[in-house]
Image (tube, rainbow, N blue to C red):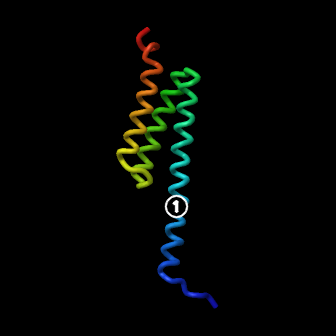
Amino acid sequence: MSVKKTSAEKRHEESEVRRLHNKAVKSECRTFIRKFVEAVQKKDQKLAAEALKKVQSELDNAYRKGVIKRNAASRKKSRMAHLYNVTFAAAAAN
């Protein structure tokens, strides 16, 4: 015989599932950001450009899924683009 769950218990289960999903999405974003920063530190412009594109895409996806807010995604994208531009500006000038 099964025991009926209260609505609070159901909501708790739902929120736990969402929390784990959001945690995975945020973790994935942080992983791509780390890979981008490593590429910039190695001064590998081609790899960094690809990583930047992927970071921006992942941040947009996280925003669309409601995991992070729009301004947070925009701020992180802007900081990554700035890091890329500052690091490789000398290479573009030559």
For residue 50, above or below residue 92? below
Q: Residue furthest bottom?
A: 1
For residue 10, above or below residue 20? below
Q: Identify which residue is drawn at 48% across, 74% down.
A: 11
Q: Residue furthest top?
A: 94
Q: What quarter of the picture does the C terminus occupy?
A: top left
User: Which residue bears the numbered disc 1?
Assistant: 19
Q: Position of residue 53 (x, y in %)?
A: 45, 34
Q: Position of residue 17 (x, y in %)?
A: 54, 65
For residue 26, above or below residue 55? below
Q: Position of residue 93 (x, y in %)?
A: 41, 11
The answer to whether 79 appears left or right of 20 in the picture is left
Q: Secondary structure at mark 1?
A: helix
Q: Identify which residue is drawn at 51% across, 27% down.
A: 48
Q: Residue furthest right?
A: 1
- Graded by Cα atoms within 10 Å as few (under 14), some (14 to 19) or many (20 or more), the crowding at tag 1 reads few
Q: Position of residue 60 (x, y in %)?
A: 41, 45
